[in-house]
Image (cartoon, coloured by chain):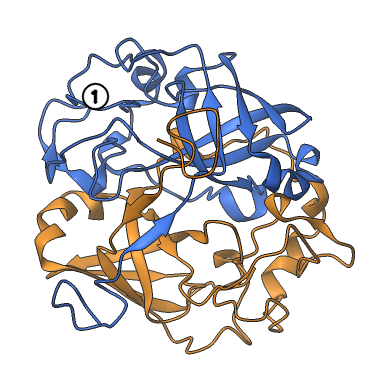
Chain colours: A blue, B orange
């Protein structure tokens, strides 16, 4: 059952996904990109959903924001400790949003300004153009806003996050943050 | 390059992930489960991270909440329109958080109460036990709280969402919501 000697039968089994669309943005490379949607206010992009999936977009435009889950397709090797853009000391990889991860899954909350003919028109885009989309979910305030959450080592760096641009430190990475 | 006749070379290429751990919870089946962490307040669980990835957990416990990205391993076929738990009319799949999706990626924001020996101790768990974990990210208020977001068709159903339990309508689904 398991390719990796895990205890659980599910643990070692590969998960295979297929992109359902492509994200387009003004960013042709990672360098100089905002590191989060919070720093990409007003940056416009679009998501082209592949034709077979378009009927699933009904009602999506009733939401002001959506969650894009995508594959950091330019990411290569990861390290389990990284110096994030917002810090000067190494942090555990899973305590950061760095793109180079064991499973390089990207998550961005973007503004949805329109839906037409299978295209999602979006703003606050911090994603490199050509990124394969895996899933779209509505951003639901009742589920996704956790007012009591505290930001760990990122606390107090909010202004910095908005101004920060990628310097390419994650070699081989696309959407660094 | 493309197995599905897409325009972009990246579009048709399969994305292969491997679980990095297993999520444990009190829920052995989907029926009767809360449909979102907001309805699972105080429900305890734990995430067992596979040994090779544990060094990446450093600094994670400085965050009060984390984002779990996981594979809805019990999900089978999807439909592009579904009647969500919170509604009585069919909605486009991507305008819902239903587990049966083209790429059955689950996303839960849970409270992190401790980290020890590769185990994440979590609360507000709406995930069926045995679910394979793909990624952990910190929930960063500056990135993830979008105060101006509006909830589309879910607007005004916040109380209902907290009380709602899965009735198994997503046949074959695990973590329905």
**A164 is higher (above) or lower (below) than B88:** above
Q: Is residue A168 left or right of residue B107?
A: left
Residue B87, position in %: x, y? 84, 65
In the displayed structure, does residue B152 sit left or right of residue B33? right
Most extreme residue toward the right, as rendered?
A: B89
Q: Is residue B147 left or right of residue A68?
A: right
Residue A64 to residue A46: above or below? below
Q: Secondary structure at mark 1?
A: loop
Tally the marks: 1
Q: Whole-percent x and y of residue B168?
A: 68, 83
- Left/right placement of residue B159 relative to residue B130 reads right
In the depicted view, which residue is nearer to us: A62 or A144? A62
User: Label 1: few (<14), some or many (≥20) within 10 Å?
Assistant: many
Residue farthest to the bottom? B28
> Where's the N terminus of chain A, which quadrant?
bottom left
Spot occupied by residue B149 in the image (x, y as percentages of width and height): 68, 36
Image quadrant assignment for residue A93: top left
Vertical comparison of B143 with B23: above or below = above
Give the quadrant of the C terminus of chain A.
top left
Q: Quadrant of residue B131?
A: bottom left
Residue found at x 19% / y 83%: A7
Seen at 29% across and 16% down, the residue is A166
Chain letter of mark 1 equals A
The residue that appears at 18% across and 73% down in the rendered structure is A3
Identify the residue at horizontal 25%, vertical 46% (top origin).
A95
Nearer to me, B15 or B148: B15
The image quadrant of residue A101 is: top left
Q: Along the line of sight, which residue is nearer the eye, A118 or A70?
A: A118
Tell me the residue that label 1 is attached to. Answer: A85
Give the image location of residue A8, x and y in percent. Answer: 26, 82
């Amino acid at each position: 059952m398991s390719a990796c000697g895990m205890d659980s039968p599910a643990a070692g089994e590969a998960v295979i996904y297929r992109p359902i669309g492509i994200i387009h943005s003004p960013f042709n490379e990672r360098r100089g990109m905002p590191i989060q949607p919070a720093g990409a206010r007003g940056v416009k992009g679009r998501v082209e959903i592949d034709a077979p999936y378009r009927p699933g977009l009904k009602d999506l435009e009733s939401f002001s924001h959506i969650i894009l889950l995508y594959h950091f397709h330019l990411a290569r090797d990861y390290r389990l400790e990284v110096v994030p853009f917002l810090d000067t000391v190494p942090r555990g990889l899973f305590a950061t949003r760095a793109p180079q991860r064991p499973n390089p899954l990207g998550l961005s909350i973007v503004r949805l300004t329109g839906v037409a003919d299978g295209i999602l028109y979006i703003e606050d885009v911090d994603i490199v153009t050509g990124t394969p989309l895996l899933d779209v979910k509505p951003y639901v305030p009742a589920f996704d806003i956790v007012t009591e959450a505290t930001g760990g080592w990122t606390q107090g760096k909010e202004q910095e996050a908005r101004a920060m641009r990628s310097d390419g430190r994650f070699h081989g990475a696309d959407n660094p943050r």
